[in-house]
Amino acid sequence: MTGTPGYRTGRVRGLIADDRPALDDVPPGAVTEAARRPHPAPDGRSAPPANRGRTPPATAPDSTPPDPADDRVTQPLPGPGPVQRARGGRETLRRSSAGARTRSIRTRLYVLVGATLVVVCVAMGVITALFQHAYLMGNLDDRVLDTAERALSRASSHPDGADDPTFLRGTGQPAGTLSARLDEKGAVLSAAVVVQDASANDPVHDPVHDLGTGQRSALAGLRADGAMHTRTVPGLGTYRVTVLEDGDVRVLAGLPMDDVQDTLDALVTIETGVAVAGLAAAGCVCAVVIRRQLRPLGRVAATAAEVSRAPLGDGGITGLTRVPARDTDPGSEAGQVGAALNHLLDQVESSLAERQRDEERIRRSEERVRRSEEGMRRSEERMRRFLADASHELRTPLASIAGYAELMNRGTDRVEPVLAWRRVSAESARMTGLVEDLLLLARLDEGRPLDSRDVDMAALVAETVRKARAAAGGHDWRLELSLDAPASVTGDEARLRQVVAALLSNARMHTPAGTTVTASVRSTAERRVIRVRDDGPGIPAPLLPTVFERFTRADTSRSRTDAGSGGSGLGLAVAAAITAAHGGRIHVDSVPGRTEFTVDLPAAVEAEAEQRAVSGNGASV
């Protein structure tokens, strides 16, 4: 971009002209240098030099050393340039103007009301003083005219006594009355002033004093037109005078204006005092009223400030502070602001609550997806483990059967036939039981209905305990019955017997000989509760959450010393599935020295009409 260097420099200097510091803060050299700069034109551009277009006159080189003050101006200073300084100056002025505009409403009301009251009081005082001045001056003019007429009447009776103001020695002349005889050109022939009331003839003191030359000259030049004039007489003060004539007699008469001025001064003093007192009282009243009227707005502002400090970005804010009900009256402006702020806060809370609900829904959805994924992983893991366990459980008896069959084929000298057939029958029975349990679980998973009839759980548990005692005499088997109602349920008797047998078998297989196993039946009006409790070593804590899952065993190895040394891990899973199919629930509590399985079943739909109560506390069977 090209242009005249002088023009650009002048424009920049014009911009910074408003931001120049005061002359008291500028070094002398800087002022001299500033004086040499071209002044900006009205349109903002610098004025052209006076010798533009002409050859500048030759000047002798200046041999004086440069002033350090001049160097500070002529040399560039580090920091922002002139344009930046100009912008900074304008920003400072703009900020100061904005600060002046952003005074509080209370301060602006105070200033506005105070200024209005002052203007009103001053206007009333001035108007009152002007009207009073006009009234007093009119009254004084009437008195001056009366005095002039009396003086003219007396002077007309002595037309030859132009040099002797004897007409002032008459009665009725107040002190300060001034009178003079004038010729046809307005020159004063004689003049005198009454120094005391001329109400009586005083042979000792003359009440009339003649005026001096200087005093007379102040009264000269008046025309006999009957108009009122104000003249200042040296030594006497300001007078209101008029000139009347009767033929060749011209008389000037006047009265002092001191009374009028004193009255006006007293009036102004009284008005000033009353105005100051009134302004003070009105200011106090206005301050109280303004403070009281702005108090609701202050509470609204305090509420808004409190809300602004709340961490609204977190999204979990509820119960934001509201403007009190007394400050939401729609009949006032502050009430309208308060009501609008409350409505705004309601909208904010609604938005925050909606956003929180959306976030909660998203979190729940993510949690459901996570649980679903975990469930799928667990399901896949259970499926893989189930297939592995099922294949191992089926492979073991099949391998045993195949081994004994191979030995039988090779000859009877290697194994006794009776032992071989016994082992084959045992493994076949084991494999048959495993397959039947798997088929039962599959049918229960599909929701196939079971046989439904009334089953007496007390008799069923008692019979199962007797069988367990006959099969494992090394344990102490006990039965406890607490029947407040018939212990009948509606269900499949064979499957319920399988549940109780699985619990007793689990206690027998996983506890040492001599362990006490107690089976109890408790019957209430609505529930039938069967418990199997033992005082064995208990179930390991890591195994408790999965004890009712399929193929769960305390011994994770797959080796068997014999066919009856361990279960397949399906007994408790089958018991849980049968219980759930009958509308009941099963759970276990285990600590070292006490393990208790609890089966809770609903009562039969049609109970026996006759109730029986059979109770036994610690009865052995």
Image: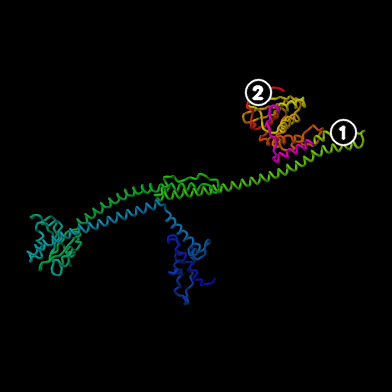
Whether residue 154 is situated above or below residue 512 in the rendered picture: below
Q: Nearer the viewer, residue 399 or 249?
A: 399
Type of secondary structure dominating the magenta stretch: helix
- Is 440 included in the stretch rendered in magenta? yes
Res. 90 mark:
none
Give the CA distance from mark 2 to mark 1.
Answer: 50 Å
Disc sitting over residue 420 in the figure: 1
Front residue of 286/18: it is 286
Q: Quadrant of residue 414?
A: top right
Left of 620 or right of it: where is 265?
left
Q: Residue 615: which disc?
A: 2
Q: x%, y% of residue 199?
A: 10, 55
Q: Is 17 situated left or right of 125 in this image? A: right
Q: Amino acid at mark 1?
A: Ala
Does the magenta portion include 210? Answer: no
Give the amino acid type for the residue marked by disc 2 in the picture: Ser
| Residue 179 x, y percent position in the rendering | 14, 62
Determine whether the residue tagged by mark 2 lies in a helix, strand or loop.
strand
Kindly indicate the quadrant of the structure image that contains residue 133: bottom left
Look at 24% across and 53% down and name the residue there: 267
Pick the front one: 318 or 188? 318
Mark 2 closeness class: few <14, some 14–19, many ≥20 residues within 10 Å? some
Q: Which residues are magenta?
A: 432-461
Q: Is residue 103 above or below residue 502?
A: below
Q: Earlier in the sequence, mark 2 or mark 1?
A: 1
Q: Is residue 333 left or right of residue 555?
A: left
What's the residue at 62%, 47% (across, down)? 365
Image coords of residue 112 (percent x, y): 36, 54
